[in-house]
Image (spheres, coloured by chain):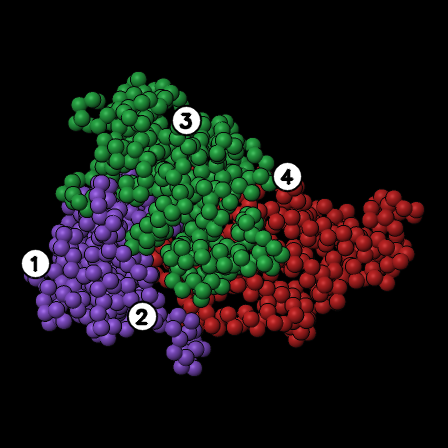
């Protein structure tokens, strides 16, 4: 039997706003095995970030988890008390944020921020407070070396603003990895970075994952990144998962019209003569959605039958899709 | 072939932290060398794609072409007129023919003005239309970019990112310009919306006979929209040529690195034999001596650290600035 | 984390300003004190209709008459009479004219000058900015009241001179706010867009930037108005304000000083009037700030 690290079942996260109840995540279920890298793809409003903020226990008022369960290594996280959550966060599950400059505290040196995390979570540190601090400092230095910061000894006591964007992202990864978490959630780790730096950071995460046997969730809007670094992929649209499966199977043979639309929207360097085909329309508002396929208004395959609640259904080995008429155009099975 | 725009030796330096008192006291201040001697030609009706990483000066170059930033030196000849010497009145007239589309659809529209007011403003400034003619022209351009007259009295915050970008395009095109700087027009948009805007820009170009300078950090997008590509690094053009030439047969090591950093959708082996660049972009305040790329270049040799290579024509249409490809360089030819 | 990602498109056709004003109106406390403030304004405008007596009608028989509910009081003179036998209630009602007139005119003059100077400094930069900013720094270096006293000592007391003396220094506050906001707004792309379409500098400043920075100006002016009212009262208290016999709250407090221990009503009621008006304006401005500052939203 496979070793499941994270299991999300039927998660529903809502925000009670002035404009009405916004269901940002609506019935998301997924599981992640040890050592697996899962890509989560979606556009803004798809609920991908809110899903994992729910996992981290970071949903604040007016948001709340309305339904579902999240288990991390067989421990239920929904309703976990804040102290226990704090111990878990950073130590066993770590998350890196999209914007490294605002996620790092500008008032503390980089070394201080890593050391604080270690002092708070690492039980292997022993001795007096001073001795612990010394050990933590050494470990922090190791971490910065691991994430590839050149001459870490000299940069150690610098402040976040003295680092460039790529270096800050590395520092944040170093902080996230300081306690050797068993699960890393990387929320758009490279969106703010240039393409040459993006490659460096992704290689870094992939390398550490192999070295530490860590599970990784890579939240991104870039299917190319998913294709290169993830074993499996989950495609989200308007708060729901619409398609899941092994990355290469999904990309080579997408079943959901939204996944196909996304793939057709990206210009490919390997085939510049191919015309891109945009998806028409925009993402629906998440307030008071009717019980129907959420992609219906933008879908070329929409039929009256789509005006009902659509469940996930199997569509191949380890693959699922939320569509009544799945298939690849031209594949003959529409 | 007739060039609509010819740029020779364009330089834009910013004085940072100097102020009036500093200037009176002769304080040298800090010079940010954003654009450092750029030569460019854009043929009428063509799209030149300008690619580079953040901080390479590509946005500054785009704005300097329109004199939104006053160039420090150099010549910009638009349709035969040197616009760097135009006085305020002549420049204002010239603005009808050169326009810009911005990256951030949230910052580029005045939140206190209705869509109708925003789009009509250029015509009012130049007193090109008034009354019902004004309204007709506004409605007709809105229709053209995929909006309609019911949007006239709404405010920007009531629109999604993609719709806002359409408003920005309508504003830029309402005076029928010949040349448009597209400064990362799709970078802030979701993938599916990005494709819609690329299509729209492409259609408008065909229909109105526009000439674009298309600035982006995304080489797939650049490859898709451009006739020719210019690669910028630290304020200089390091390679320029026909799109197919640059993408299929890149000459400059930086272009090669950029291309190999792009994640591919197709299952490929490129990940392992990727050209990995060391470190980050150097500071434009204190750029390295010699070739500005030598600090990150995997192929750098002694001469690269001493002498800056010039942009040289290599074959009929492709040029690069690199000692290794230069005809009289150390290797004596390509 | 919440709103940006779910990307809500507001369905209502209203401006941000209207939305903020609705938010303001939803606070009961703010609305109550707004009503009190409006009450004062109405009182000032309609003083001759409301006041039971002529504020300057002296009658030594009524000298130091206590408020109506005390022994020796008379319901015709509810709040009692002062040392010259003038009705205190009527004087407070007429005095509100001075406070509100000076408060409003100083703020209007100062805000107009401050906004224009701040826009020019923040948008044009260069020597304009240097001159204006240094002037602001120098003016900020003087203690406010002493500065005003010195000016009035030179020009002599009088309504117009008081307004000028206070506005001389008051404009630096909106100026600093506007300069900062302008600097931040100038880098925004819609300003560049206006430049690219050939809009003139004054057009950009007044049509593009100004509407976007009015909210903080509105908030600052209301807070400062409360301050100016106190300053005017202070000047009148010191005898540099409006000259007798015109009723002014500050002067009434000052006149009652020598009777403070026995005939407390002479100073207390005008003092309470100052307190209530300033408090109301402050609560209103607090409400405005909360409504207009996005940090307090959601």
Name the element at disc 4. Answer: helix
Which residue was labeled with disc 4? Answer: C28
Closer to the camera in the image, C6 or A208? A208
Give the residue at mark 2.
B287
Q: Are marks 2 and 4 on the same chain?
A: no
Res A79 → quadrant: top right
Q: Which mark is residue B126?
A: none
Residue C148 in percent (x, y) is at 65, 69
Query: Residue C31 at x, y = what percent?
Result: 63, 41
Q: Are marks 1 and 4 in contact (CB under 8 Å)?
A: no
Q: Colour of chain C?
A: red
* Distance Cα–Cα, label 2 vs label 1: 36 Å
Quadrant occupied by the C terminus of chain B: bottom left
**Tag 1 residue:** B1
Which element is circle 1 on? loop
Task: Give the Cα separation between the discs numbered 3 and 4.
Answer: 34 Å
Disc 2/disc 4 C-alpha distance (Å) = 60 Å
Which residue is denoted by mark 3 in the rendering?
Answer: A289
Q: Residue at x 54, y 49 (%)?
A: A124
| Left-right relation of B193 to A287 | left
Of circles 2 and 3, the one toward us is 2
Q: Chain of mark 1?
A: B
């Amino acid at each position: 039997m496979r070793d499941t690290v994270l299991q999300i079942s039927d998660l529903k996260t809502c925000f009670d706003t002035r404009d009405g109840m916004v269901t940002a995540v609506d019935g998301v279920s997924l599981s992640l095995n040890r050592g697996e890298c899962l890509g989560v793809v979606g556009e803004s409003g798809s609920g991908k970030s809110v899903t994992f903020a729910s996992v981290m226990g970071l949903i604040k008022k007016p948001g709340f988890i309305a339904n579902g369960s999240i288990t991390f290594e067989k421990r239920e996280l929904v309703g976990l008390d804040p102290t226990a959550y704090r111990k878990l966060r950073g130590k066993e599950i770590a998350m890196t944020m999209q914007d490294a400059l605002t996620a790092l505290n500008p008032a503390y040196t980089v070394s201080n921020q890593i050391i604080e995390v270690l002092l708070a979570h690492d039980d292997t540190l022993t001795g007096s407070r001073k001795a612990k601090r010394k050990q933590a400092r050494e470990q922090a230095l190791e971490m910065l070396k691991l994430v590839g910061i050149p001459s870490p000894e000299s940069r150690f006591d610098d402040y976040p603003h003295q680092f460039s964007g790529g270096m800050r992202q590395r520092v944040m990864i170093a902080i996230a990895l300081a306690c050797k978490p068993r699960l890393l959630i990387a929320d758009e780790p490279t969106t703010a970075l240039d393409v040459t730096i993006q490659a460096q950071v992704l290689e870094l995460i992939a390398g550490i994952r192999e070295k530490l046997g860590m599970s990784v969730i890579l939240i991104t809007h870039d299917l190319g990144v998913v294709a290169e670094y993830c074993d499996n992929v989950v495609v989200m649209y308007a708060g729901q998962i619409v398609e899941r499966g092994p990355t290469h199977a999904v990309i080579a043979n997408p079943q959901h019209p939204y996944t196909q639309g996304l793939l057709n929207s990206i210009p490919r360097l390997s085939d510049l003569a191919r015309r891109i085909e945009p998806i028409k329309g925009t993402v629906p508002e998440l307030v008071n959605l009717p019980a129907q396929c959420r992609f219906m208004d933008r879908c070329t395959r929409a039929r009256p039958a789509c005006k009902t609640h659509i469940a996930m259904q199997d569509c191949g080995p380890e693959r699922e899709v939320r569509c009544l008429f799945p298939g690849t155009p031209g594949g003959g099975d529409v | 072939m007739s060039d609509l725009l010819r740029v020779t030796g364009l330089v834009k330096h910013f004085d940072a932290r100097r102020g009036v008192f500093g200037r009176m006291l002769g304080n040298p201040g800090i010079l940010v060398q954003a654009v450092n001697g750029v030569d460019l030609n854009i043929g009428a009706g063509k799209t030149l794609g300008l690619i580079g990483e953040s901080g390479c000066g590509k946005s500054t170059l785009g704005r300097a072409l329109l004199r939104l930033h006053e160039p420090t030196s150099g010549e910009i000849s638009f349709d035969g007129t040197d616009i760097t010497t135009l006085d305020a009145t002549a420049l204002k007239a010239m603005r009808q023919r050169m326009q810009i589309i911005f990256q951030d659809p949230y910052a580029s529209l005045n939140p206190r003005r209705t869509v109708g007011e925003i789009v009509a403003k250029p015509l009012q400034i130049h007193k090109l239309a008034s009354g019902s003619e004004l309204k007709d022209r506004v409605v007709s351009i809105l229709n053209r970019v995929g909006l309609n007259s019911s949007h006239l009295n709404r405010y920007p915050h009531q629109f999604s990112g993609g719709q806002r970008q359409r408003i920005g395009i309508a504003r830029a095109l309402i005076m029928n310009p010949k040349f448009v700087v597209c400064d990362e027009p799709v970078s802030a948009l979701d993938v599916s919306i990005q494709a819609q805007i690329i299509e729209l820009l492409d259609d408008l170009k065909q229909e109105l006979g526009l000439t674009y300078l298309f600035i982006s950090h995304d080489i797939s997008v650049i490859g898709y929209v451009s006739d020719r590509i210019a690669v910028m690094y630290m304020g200089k053009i390091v390679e320029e040529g026909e799109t197919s030439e640059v993408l299929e047969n890149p000459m400059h090591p930086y272009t090669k690195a950029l291309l190999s950093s792009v994640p591919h959708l197709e299952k490929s082996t490129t990940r392992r034999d990727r050209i990995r660049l060391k470190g980050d972009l150097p500071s434009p305040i204190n750029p390295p001596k010699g070739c500005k790329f030598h600090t990150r270049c995997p192929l750098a040799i002694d001469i690269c650290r001493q002498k800056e290579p010039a942009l040289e024509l290599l074959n009929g249409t492709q040029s690069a600035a690199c000692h290794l490809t230069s005809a009289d360089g150390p290797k004596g030819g390509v | 984390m919440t709103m940006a990602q779910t990307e809500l498109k507001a369905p209502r056709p209203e401006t941000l300003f209207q939305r903020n004003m609705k938010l303001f109106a939803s606070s009961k406390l703010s609305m109550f004190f707004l009503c009190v403030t409006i009450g004062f304004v109405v009182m000032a405008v309609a003083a001759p209709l409301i006041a039971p007596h002529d504020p300057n009608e002296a009658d030594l028989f009524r000298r130091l008459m206590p408020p109506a509910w005390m022994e020796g009081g008379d319901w015709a003179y509810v709040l009692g009479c002062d040392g010259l036998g003038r009705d205190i209630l009527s004087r407070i009602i007429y005095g509100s004219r001075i406070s509100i007139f000076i408060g409003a005119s100083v703020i209007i003059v100062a805000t107009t000058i401050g906004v224009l100077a701040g826009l020019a400094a923040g948008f044009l930069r260069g020597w304009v900015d240097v001159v204006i900013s240094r002037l602001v720094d120098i003016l900020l270096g003087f203690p406010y009241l002493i500065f005003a006293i010195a000016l009035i000592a030179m020009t002599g007391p009088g309504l117009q001179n008081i307004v000028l003396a206070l506005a001389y220094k008051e404009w630096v506050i909106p100026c600093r706010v506007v300069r900062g906001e302008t600097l931040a707004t100038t880098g925004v792309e819609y300003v560049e867009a206006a430049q690219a379409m050939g809009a003139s500098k004054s057009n950009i400043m007044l049509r593009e930037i100004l509407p976007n920075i009015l909210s903080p100006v509105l908030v600052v002016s209301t807070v400062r108005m409360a301050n100016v009212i106190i300053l005017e009262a202070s000047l009148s208290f010191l005898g540099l304000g409006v000259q007798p016999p015109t009723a002014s709250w500050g002067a009434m407090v000052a006149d009652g000083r020598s009777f403070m221990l026995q005939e407390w009503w002479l100073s207390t009621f005008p003092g309470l009037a100052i307190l209530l008006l300033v408090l109301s304006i402050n609560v209103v401005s607090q409400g405005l700030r909360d409504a207009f500052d996005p940090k307090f939203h959601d």
